[in-house]
Image (cartoon, rainbow, N blue to C red):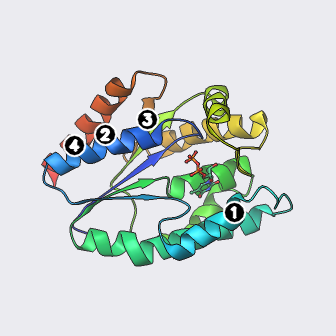
Amino acid sequence: MSQGIFITMEGPDGSGKSTQIALLKEYLEKEGYDVLITREPGGTAISEAIREVILNKDFQEMSPVTEMLLYASARAQLIHEVVGPALEKGQAVISDRFVDSSLVYQGIARGLGVEKVYEVNLNAIGKYMPDVTFLLDLPAEVGIARKKGQKDLDRMELESLEFHKSVAQGYRDMAARFPERIKSVDATRPVEEISDLIIREVSDILKKN
Ligand code: TYD
């Protein structure tokens, strides 16, 4: 087991992960942790370069298997270069998305199968499974409407509403499958209420460590 704490934030596009990550960081710093925040795909020079390829909306021909392998490659480098060393040093790491995104987007929404995607990803993550994962649960329509207001949509965000509905449901299935690790929170609730729930859960974990 590593000494730090590894927390991942998951949810459909537009579910408010960044806001919650910032609030959780504040809390962990008050608790005396050195906090590292990272995002997927990305977080290292190589992973950010892979991100450019994955999300490029000109690459409509990308096959689901290529997509799965690229996300896993970006993840392998992030673990090797950033997450693994930080946890070994006792830091708190919060990642905006991690392996559950692949299980849901590639395994379920793209139809590759959760088991297959998990197996491939084990090569990337090794022993570094999150201590806790928060699912910001949101209806697909709400997430997409929030994103549309924000920026140019990337290749994944341009997918059909049906795809995003399958993502939202896929996350619920994953939360039911791993109830010990994945804690689901209603992302339509006010920001402070969601943050209180998350912080309470993390504080319980810190007490047990
Ligand atoms: P990003 O702009 O980071 O999305 P968000 O702000 O919603 O987190 O883009 C990441 C996109 O990649 C997002 O649509 C989810 C998708 N994704 C996967 O399909 N598989 C993965 O393993 C990861 C990490 C992300």
Residue highlighted by disc 4: 27
Mark nearer the viewer, 3 or 4: 4
7 left or right of 32 in image = right
Mark nearer the viewer, 2 or 3: 2
**Mark 3 belongs to which amino acid?**
Ser
54 left or right of 16 in image = right
| Quadrant hosting residue 53 | bottom right
Gap in angstroms between the C-alphas marked 1 and 4: 33 Å
Residue highlighted by disc 1: 54
- Which residue is at the front of the view, 116 or 125? 125
**Mark 1 belongs to which amino acid?**
Ile
**Mark 4 belongs to which amino acid?**
Tyr
Say if mark 1 contacts mark 3, CB within 8 Å: no
Gap in angstroms between the C-alphas marked 1 and 3: 27 Å
Residue highlighted by disc 3: 184
Residue highlighted by disc 2: 23
Gap in angstroms between the C-alphas marked 2 and 3: 17 Å
Question: Residue 181 at what x, y percent from top left?
Answer: 38, 48
**Mark 2 belongs to which amino acid?**
Leu
Say if mark 4 contacts mark 2, CB within 8 Å: yes
